[in-house]
Amino acid sequence: MILQRVTSFLFLATLFSVSFEKIQWELAGTIGLAGILAVLFVASFALERLGEWPRRIHRTVAIVLLFAAAFLVVYLAGFYNIESEQAASQFAKGLARFAITFSFAAVGIAYLARRPLRFYWVALGALCAGIALNGAYGVVQLAFAETGRDLDQTVLGPLLGDARSINFYGSVEGADVYRPNALTNDPNHLGIVLLLPLLILTPLYLRLERGHPMRVPLMVLLPFLLLVELATLSRSGLLGLLVGVLVLLFPYGRRFVSAAVLVPLGALVLGLAVIVSRRVDFFETVVRSRLDTDTGSTATHFEVYELVRPALEGHLLFGLGLNTFSVYYEAVTGLTNWGPHSFYAALVIETGIVGAALFAAFIWWLFRRLRAGHRLGKALALMRDPLAARVRPLAWGLTAAVVGVMAANAFYLTMQQSYFYALAMLALALPVVFGRRLSAA
């Protein structure tokens, strides 16, 4: 009984902390809080299952493990293309991250399949609550910076020894401009991870009945998260949000013009109008700088794709090696402070056409399971099961979140992080968990 509670706590704690990139330590390499918790969860789950017989593996879990094995083969094949000690070190870090994230995803699905339906909602709540806390930290971080103080060194410094401070964007009219990165390492990381609660919770909120206890909290939370999204000034995050909303407009277009959306959104717009009206020139300059496509930072996001072809000369099949893009980029450009500004460019360069094709197959299967979740919701609706009012919007929300994150990563690199595999785990577990309701009926 105690072990079961420990396993449950570790699972929820991992989901809660998957966006806390800054909280990390040097323990035989850099490892974050979420990684430590994920390893402990997998170990605890394994101990919990030791005395059980027969040991059955769910089909979805088995397929995840097969994908993991296939990725491992590709990565090991790419290892033989590594030509420097620095690249080998980066490869080891990437392989460790892959092992932790994929293990957590596979074991997480198996764990959710064994728990009651209600626990899935608790898990989803833990993920969204952790990201919401991240957003709240970002607001406080921004407020501290405006007064000349550093929240990260005050709060995280004593715990970590050092912490990356808020992003300084520049100065306008003698006033400093900051972009909150909260508990992530970059404002764009924060902007992208915020897509998860924004896109997953919105369709669930739109389908809540009048008087539901979660209606008011979500009515407050979603505009707040949107405000933090805007504060990051992340073009990648806004691109992902736009694409995700377009996905949600397909089933819920009419509901987006209802009072449930227009009232909180109008309140947010009114609040922003009041703030902007006090410093119109300041905000106009900041926004124009982010929309300017002729800047060097914008060009970098597109130029990174030009590195793909020369990188694959002689390494077409398996690429230069997992997590070695930064080493290659430094050798080509001489820059040490830039990483890959596209997940897809990094994917092809590091793992070649075989690795890219394998990842495409994994994403295709992920969408197949999401489609199964949509069909499950329709089947429950035909049975007049009230659970359909939750499963269908959940399936749409997860679909929008996956599509939005994929769009955002066209010009940034976050899909190798823990949050994405937590999202994939919840998406893959959807038909597994709620399919039991249909089977019982």
Image: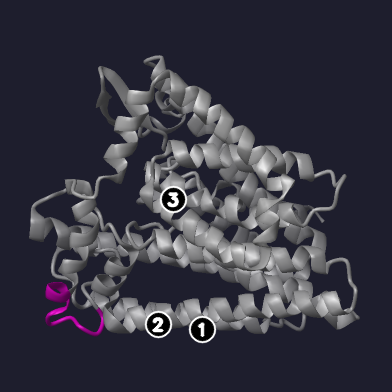
User: Closer to us: mark 1 or mark 2?
Assistant: 2
278 within the magenta span: no
Tag 2 secondary structure: helix
Q: Answer few, some or many: residues within 10 Å of disc 1's Cα (few below 14, many 20 plus, some between 14 and 19).
A: few
Residue contact at pointers 1 and 2, CB within 8 angstroms: no
> Please, is residue 229 above or below residue 8 in the view?
above
Q: CA distance from mark 3 to mark 1?
A: 34 Å
Q: How is the image coloured?
A: one colour
314 within the magenta span: yes
Which residue does the numbered mark 1 point to in the structure image? 66
Which residue does the numbered mark 2 point to in the structure image? 358
The residue sitting at 65% across, 60% down in the picture is: 44
Q: Over which residues does the magenta segment extend?
A: 309-318
The answer to which of marks 1 and 2 sits earlier in the sequence is 1
Which residue does the numbered mark 3 point to in the structure image? 238
Residue 181 percent across, percent down from the top left: 41, 38
Main SS class of the magenta portion in the image: loop
The residue sitting at 66% across, 38% down in the picture is: 264
**Along the horizontal axis of the image, is 243 left or right of 388?**
left
The residue sitting at 83% across, 76% down in the picture is: 380
**Along the horizontal axis of the image, is 351 left or right of 274?**
left
Checking the image for residue 288, the label placed there is none
**Along the horizontal axis of the image, is 133 left or right of 310?**
right
Query: Is any part of residue 25 visible from this angle?
Result: yes
User: Closer to us: mark 3 or mark 2?
Assistant: 3
Residue 172 percent across, percent down from the top left: 27, 24
The C terminus lies in quadrant: bottom right
Query: Is any part of residue 415 visible from this angle?
Result: no
Q: CA distance from mark 3 to mark 2?
A: 28 Å
Image quarter of residue 186: top left
